[in-house]
């Protein structure tokens, strides 16, 4: 497990303000800046995950049997839910598409439809089963809890927006912990840093163990999720995460921050590798990017660069049929 927050600070000089801070800031402003720098956004802060959360809707829909990869949908560029027109990111719509293509296209109407098929009661039960209403239990202080509607307050519009990752908030570590269980065969592993306590001589005093929940999703659903998310990278919006010689899976996200219409976004990409036997997962989240703000364009390359270094370092072999057609050896 590794985490990075930007801007960083020097542990040997934690009160040094980040480079570029105006010299005219007041003492109170300086302290607020430092408080922000010292926060571990990976576990201390929540955010609206946006389209990376479509993985949850997909997993729930597949588990419940309300959607299959061959199901066909029609996207005219929007979907009407009660009195609301919920738009797709593609203004003209994606037209006819199956569920695999809908996932590759990150099509809002497709995932709203899946959410509607589940219904609020069943969706909420999967939300709970997947562990999203609990903290991950990571062995670091200050983990924030999920901010979610009360079950009785989830109407059709709320259900629709939840289905594509808006109107609630989770932590990045919660997102990764949950999605990892979808692609590792259904095991929800407690994220942790500590492995053992040792004396100066190296003798182990205590080994730490952490809870693992089995059966989050079936093996069939897990295999389907791996296939869907690999298609996102190979043929969908996640192409910038391709690492030559390796099979990569992932999901992009570009979500508006509150208040809506402010012109500010959160861009992200969650990826895992190898797609057929996941051993490494990473998520990159960029707050309020300047200029280009699509997750597939600016966050996916960050994860690609991580994988280009991590996979060889861990001696994880590539495959002949991966992108680029070359072995990663």
Image (spheres, helix red, strand yellow):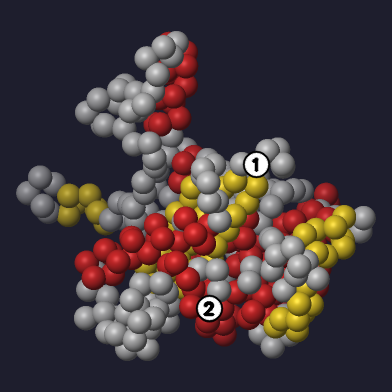
Q: Residue at x 69, y 61 (%)?
A: 89
Could you classify mark 2 by the number of other residues whose Cα lies within 10 Å: few (under 14), some (14-19), or many (20 or more)?
few
Left or right: residue 12 versus residue 291 is left
Q: Residue at x 30, y 23 (%)?
A: 16
Mark 1, residue position: 263
Mark 2, residue position: 235
Left or right: residue 190 versus residue 160 is left
In this rendering, the answer to whether 246 lies above or below 311 is below
Q: Position of residue 60 (x, y in %)?
A: 67, 71
Which quadrant of the rendered structure holds the C terminus? bottom left
Which quadrant of the rendered structure holds the N terminus? bottom left
Judging from the image, what secondary structure is the residue with disc 1 in? loop
Q: Is residue 197 at all visible to an observer of this figure? A: yes
In this rendering, the answer to whether 321 lies above or below 148 is below
Judged from this view, the residue extending furthest toward the left is 201
Q: Residue at x 39, y 23 (%)?
A: 21
Depth check: give the residue in front, 59 or 230.
Answer: 230
Q: Position of residue 325 (x, y in %)?
A: 34, 86
Q: Residue at x 25, y 25 (%)?
A: 13
């Amino acid at each position: 497990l590794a985490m990075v927050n930007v801007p960083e600070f020097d542990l040997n000089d934690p009160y040094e303000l980040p480079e570029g801070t105006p010299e005219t800031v007041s003492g109170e402003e300086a302290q607020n800046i430092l408080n922000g720098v010292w926060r571990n956004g990976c576990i201390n802060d929540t955010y609206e995950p946006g389209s990376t959360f479509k993985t949850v809707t997909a997993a729930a829909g597949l588990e419940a049997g309300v959607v299959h990869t061959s199901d066909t949908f029609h996207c005219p560029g929007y979907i009407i839910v009660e009195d609301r027109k919920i738009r797709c990111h593609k203004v003209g719509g994606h037209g006819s598409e199956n569920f695999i293509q809908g996932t590759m296209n990150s099509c809002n109407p497709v995932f709203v439809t899946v959410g509607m098929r589940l219904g609020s009661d069943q969706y909420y039960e999967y939300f709970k089963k997947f562990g999203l209403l609990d903290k991950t239990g990571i062995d670091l202080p200050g983990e924030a809890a999920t901010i979610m509607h009360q079950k009785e307050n989830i109407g059709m519009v709320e259900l629709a927006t939840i289905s594509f990752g808006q109107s609630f908030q989770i932590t990045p570590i919660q997102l990764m912990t949950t999605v990892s269980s979808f692609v590792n065969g259904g095991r929800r592993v407690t994220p942790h840093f500590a492995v053992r306590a040792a004396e100066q001589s190296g003798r182990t005093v205590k080994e730490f163990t952490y809870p693992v929940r089995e059966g989050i999703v079936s093996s069939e659903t897990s295999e389907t999720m791996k296939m869907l998310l690999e298609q996102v990278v190979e043929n969908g919006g996640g192409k910038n995460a391709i690492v030559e010689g390796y099979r990569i899976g992932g999901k992009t996200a570009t979500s508006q921050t509150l208040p809506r219409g402010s012109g500010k976004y959160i861009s992200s990409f969650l990826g895992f590798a190898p797609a057929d036997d996941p051993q490494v997962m990473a998520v990159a989240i960029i707050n309020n990017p300047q200029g280009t703000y699509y997750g597939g364009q600016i966050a996916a390359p960050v994860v690609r660069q991580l994988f280009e270094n991590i996979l060889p370092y861990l001696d994880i072999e590539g495959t002949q049929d991966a992108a680029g057609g070359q072995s990663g050896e």
